[in-house]
Image (cartoon, rainbow, N blue to C red):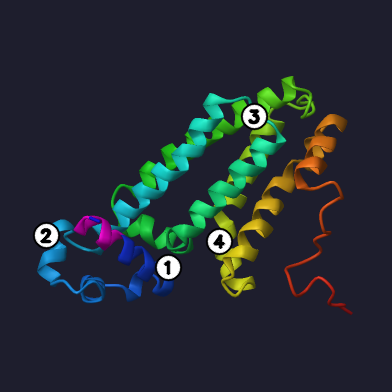
């Protein structure tokens, strides 16, 4: 592995564990057993490292975007793409946890992210249009109905990691399926009978476990 890749790998680990304020050039170089000067030869400061990690996340999420273009979407594709994206976002979770601070601090990220969101809106809209044609989603009965839904879905997708930091203890194998299913479940009001059948088939032959709260709170009686 090249030195630049090792730096990014260690920085990602430290950012995820400590947050952006507790990670420095010195902490990363010390963990790697290299000098701070050696590290700054590759990345001048931690902001440069954060931007490089942000671009890595964008690149990895782009792989699922390519699938949207290359195949006809259905409920199975929607669930798999959501789970993949959630997994990638969790891998780079510090970016979502500290995104407001990062976008103010690292030049270029906010503008790049805004353009990325516009592309996401278009791609999701194309997928919904195809699923309407396939008879899985109901036709739009009010102009802009799906545009509003897409924005709600994007907001939910961008906000679930901070939420998980509060309600979970960091168990990836529990967190990603929980939020993937929760995000995908937002399509339920828009499904045709055929779409409903496909939805249940994707999540299992029996209906999925009823979610009434976060794990550990489902059965708590509130007076």
| Whole-percent x, y for residue 70 in the image | 53, 25
Please tell me which of labels 1 and 3 falls first in the chain: 1
Q: How many marks?
A: 4
- The residue at the point 37 percent across, 42 percent down is 112
Alpha-carbon distance for marks 4 and 1? 12 Å
| Whole-percent x, y for residue 9 in the image | 32, 61
| Front position in the image: 7 or 58 | 7
The answer to if 123 sits in the magenta stretch is: no
Query: Regarding mark 2 in the picture, which secondary structure is present there?
Result: helix
Callout 4 touching callout 2 (CB < 8 Å): no
- The residue at the point 36 percent across, 48 percent down is 56
Please provide the residue range marked out in magenta.
Answer: 2-8
Residue 16: which disc? 1
Judge from the rendering whether residue 98 lies leftward or rightward of residue 166; answer left or right: left
Please tell me which of labels 4 and 3 falls first in the chain: 3
Question: Which residue in the protein does label 2 denote?
Answer: 41
Alpha-carbon distance for marks 2 and 1? 23 Å
Query: Regarding mark 4 in the picture, which secondary structure is present there?
Result: helix
Q: To which quarter of the image does residue 6 belong?
A: bottom left
Alpha-carbon distance for marks 4 and 2? 33 Å
Residue 161: which disc? 4
Please tell me which of labels 4 and 1 falls first in the chain: 1
Q: To which quarter of the image does residue 215 belong?
A: bottom right
Q: Residues within 10 Å of mark 4 (few under 14, many from 20)?
A: many
Please tell me which of labels 3 and 2 falls first in the chain: 2
Using the image, determine if residue 143 lies above or below residue 11. above
Residue lying farthest to the bottom in this orientation: 223
Please tell me which of labels 4 and 2 falls first in the chain: 2
Question: Which residue in the protein does label 3 denote?
Answer: 73
């Amino acid at each position: 592995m090249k030195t630049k890749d090792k730096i990014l790998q260690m920085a990602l680990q430290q950012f995820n564990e400590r947050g952006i304020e507790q990670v420095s050039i010195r902490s990363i170089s010390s963990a790697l057993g290299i000098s701070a000067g050696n590290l700054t030869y590759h990345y001048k400061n931690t902001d440069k490292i954060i931007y490089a990690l942000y671009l890595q996340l964008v690149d990895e999420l782009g792989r699922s975007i390519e699938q949207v273009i290359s195949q006809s979407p259905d409920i199975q594709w929607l669930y798999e793409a959501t789970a993949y994206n959630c997994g990638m976002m969790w891998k780079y979770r510090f970016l979502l946890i500290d995104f407001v601070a990062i976008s103010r601090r690292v030049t270029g990220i906010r503008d790049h992210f805004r353009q990325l969101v516009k592309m996401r809106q278009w791609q999701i809209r194309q997928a919904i249009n195809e699923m309407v044609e396939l008879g899985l989603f109901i036709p739009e009965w009010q102009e802009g109905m799906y545009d509003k839904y897409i924005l709600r879905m994007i907001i939910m997708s961008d906000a679930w990691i901070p939420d998980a930091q509060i309600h979970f203890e960091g168990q990836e194998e529990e967190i990603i399926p929980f939020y993937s299913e929760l995000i995908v479940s937002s399509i339920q009001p828009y499904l045709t009978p055929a779409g409903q059948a496909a939805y249940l088939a994707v999540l299992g032959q029996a209906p999925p476990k009823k979610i009434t709260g976060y794990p550990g709170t489902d059965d708590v009686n509130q007076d």
